[in-house]
Amino acid sequence: MTAPDRRENVPLRSLTTFRIGGPCDCLYVPSEIERTIDLLSGLDGAAVLGGGSNILAADAGVRVPVIHTAGLDQFEFDGETVRAGCGAGLPELARAAAKRGLSGLEWASGIPGSLGGAIAMNAGAYGGEMSQVVAEALFFDGQRAAVTDSFDFSYRHSVFTENPAYVLLEAKLRLSRGDPIGIADRMEAYRRKRNEKQPSNLPSAGSFFKRPPGRYAGALIEQCGLKGVSVGGARVSEKHAGFIVNTGGAACEDVLRLAAMVRETVFKQTGAELEPEVRLLGDIRW
């Protein structure tokens, strides 16, 4: 009998903000951490998918089992701390904190990802980042569940990016008391900035490339005259060159070819090597 949290032939395009990706043969959506640990222990080679905001999935889909953490979205506040599952959405956490007069997540209110992925890549914006608020985490280390308060955070890096077998399950965040009006004002200011500068009207995976040391990927791409360049349905955004957007019906292959073109052109013209932030899901390579 099929387990209640198991689904078959789920299109990955429906689970990623890029709206790209073929079918997932077998998708598990556990709602309890214990069940998630059992799946991670028992499924050989399973992939883990969170909010799908930093993912490019293969057109052919994925044959290995995928564990989708959307069901692990519970969170609970205790004074100035919040304990949250890895599937909790950043905007939901930020809004809930703001309602309680807690500061530290204002920058995250417009980021569509989940907590697990955000901690793993030390997501950040507008001077804030996950390293400033994460106190401890429960994670699966490839064999068993463990707790850590040591994350080795740096730019778009953590102990979880260094160890692909590690899967974050739950985290405790430490926030601080603040003026609710000031918190709300900052969140609104960040929202306006995003809408003014980022192509939020089209599917994307957010900032596509990491920032090269001392430089900005978007500025380098624009400098090379690549704004608006397209391959199939994938395009370098005219609004912000650091984004590759899906203009409608883009295939994974379109994005891979466009990213390769951008990287090659920027390197030839500026000497800068652009490294994608976006993670790949399926049998595909940069």
Image (spheres, rainbow, N blue to C red):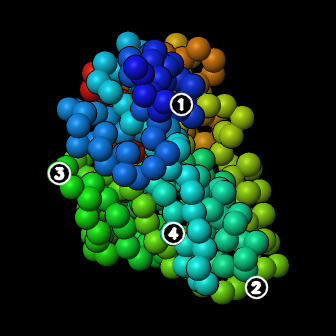
Measuring 57% from the left and 25% from the top, which residue is drawn there?
14
Contact check, label 4 and label 3, Cβ < 8 Å: no
Which quadrant is the C terminus positioned in? Answer: top left
Percent position of residue 237, x then y: 60, 34
Amino acid at pointer 2:
Asp
Q: Give x and y (percent) for residue 269.
A: 35, 38
Q: Which residue is mark 1?
A: 15
Residue furthest to the left in view is 143
Comparing labels 4 and 2, the label whose residue is closer to the camera: 4
Work out how far the residue at label 2 is from the one at label 3, CA to CA, in angstroms: 43 Å
Name above or below for residue 134 compared with residue 45.
below
Crowd tier of the residue under label 1, counting other residues whose Cα lies within 10 Å: few below 14, some 14–19, many 20 or above: many
The residue that disc 3 covers is: 143
State the CA–CA distance, disc 1 to disc 4. Answer: 25 Å
> Which of these two is toward me, 97 or 128?
97
Residue 73 at x, y = what percent?
Answer: 55, 52
Task: Judge whether residue 272 can be spotted in this image.
Answer: no
| Above or below, 88 relative to 175 | above
Which one is nearer the viewer's eye here, 133 or 10?
Answer: 10
Residue 250, given in percent of the width and then of the height, sits at 54, 17
